[in-house]
Image (cartoon, rainbow, N blue to C red):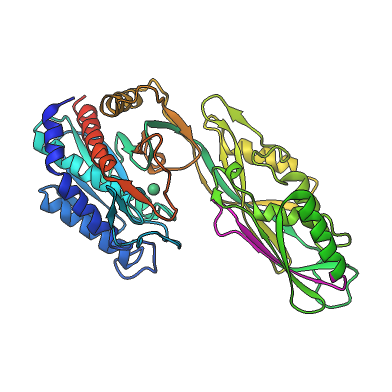
Amino acid sequence: MNKSLKDIVDSYQKDTVKTLQKLIQIKSVEAKAKKGMPFGEGIDQTLNEFLKTAEQLGLKTKNVDGYAGHVEIGEGDELLAVLCHLDVVPEGSNWKYPPYAAEIHDNKMYGRGTIDDKGPAVASLYALKAVKESEVKLNKRVRLIVGTDEESGWEGLKYYFKKEEQPDIAFSPDAGYPVIHAEKGILIFDLNYELNEEERVVDNRSNFKYEVLSLKGGNAPNMVPDSCELLMRTEHGKTLEKKLNKFQNENDLEIEMESLNKTRFKLISSGVSAHGSRPDKGVNAISIMIKFLEKLDRINVGGFVDFYNNKIGMNYYGENIGCDFSDQVSGKLVFNVGQIKYKKGLIKTTINIRYPVTMKKEDVVEAIKDSIDKYDVYLEMKNFQKPLHVPKDDPLVQTLMKVYREISGDNKSKPIAIGGGTYARAVKKGVAFGALFPGEEELAHQKDEYINLDSLHKNTLIIASAIQELAQA
Ligand SMILES: [Zn+2]
């Protein structure tokens, strides 16, 4: 490792912390667009502040119409990119310290965005500065590209690449160390069940014993829902309550019942939230609710309940719906029910799938369609991201592994595959690299998010060394 690079990084340690504090103090959750601010004021302010700091450090910058920006050093035809983002997810509640104050306690800076992904973005900024100051000769240009809506639609980065060149190679410090060389493909679609005339009860003279009037659960496709709410009309409130108690005792699952009047009841199931790539770590509140509905005879949504419990149920890997695929590189396909909504005679169930990197999305979709063929359910595609896979023996992976090992001293960790998605997918050839070290607490998108200041510093050095190794190669 180049010693002078370490000295330079050390000399900027205090500035790195100050810059990060400033950026955390600007709340950059996506908000309503304004003129010249496609993702709202907070994000725009953050992008400007970031680029201003880069300019003050003597680095070349460009703001691409408020959609994204970059900081550039070096010369050459080829381009190496570091991909970060400056937007954050909403803070949620119950923080130990205020989420936008960037307070430091026990050598940890607390705040929304400290690890995801403003901390890594600031580390990358000072890494570029250090490489430039080291005067090592580069034969590639290096760009730190900062996106602004990674947590929502990736429109910012798409816009950026319409106007700016694609890098030849890239890495994105927006996950964990060591190198993430494979990210599963992501599919988001709705399974739609249309109720027939008779099932859509509109008056009081239906033949059904239990009538579901509304049903709603989950906030996002990529989350395991922790709550699902249902409104029911029935003359058999007592029986309903009895069945519910029996169900809870037998299954150790939680559904609350509230009576609104003699014939209307609200049921709320409670699960455990988790990231959509890890449904096994949560308990799906929607699946709990539908599992219970099976116990009710003569219910208007019986056809749907039958479909759901037969094909989806409480499974995580698509076992019953024809898509329990897996491969050597990235493991099992993961199946998450993120949302459900019953409105105007249509039950929409939103599914989020992470499929193995060696598969095509068509194979997954066709397998599911075949499996649900005999039900009155149709699949409506919403969104998809193709998988990412850079082989372990590729020079990009090898070089990053070498740099990581030298600086961290961790010789055991191997390149890994994940179900999450980073900006590395948005380029021809890229991988996620950092910024969380093995064993560190995973707090992205949660309360009390923090970055350890030693880790922030180590990140700067690793990123700087990685740039130096990859750009002088
Ligand atoms: Zn992120």
Is residue 271 left or right of 167 when viewed as pictured?
right
**Among all residues in the image, which is located at the extreme top?**
393
Q: Quadrant of residue 406?
A: top left
- Residue 7 seen: yes
- Residue 163 seen: no
310 or 235, which lies in front? 235
Is residue 172 left or right of 330 when viewed as pictured?
left
**Among all residues in the image, which is located at the extreme right?**
207
Q: Quadrant of residue 52?
A: bottom left
Is residue 205 left or right of 388 when viewed as pictured?
right
The quadrant the N terminus occupies is: top left
Residue in the picture at 48% in, 42% down: 420
Residue in the picture at 22% in, 33% down: 467
Relative image position of residue 416 (x, y in whole percent): 44, 29
Is residue 393 left or right of 458 when viewed as pictured?
right
Relative image position of residue 425 (x, y in whole percent): 41, 40
The quadrant the C terminus occupies is: top left
Relative image position of residue 439 (x, y in whole percent): 41, 35
Residue in the picture at 41% in, 57% down: 89
Q: Which residues are magenta?
A: 215-237
344 or 237, which lies in front? 237
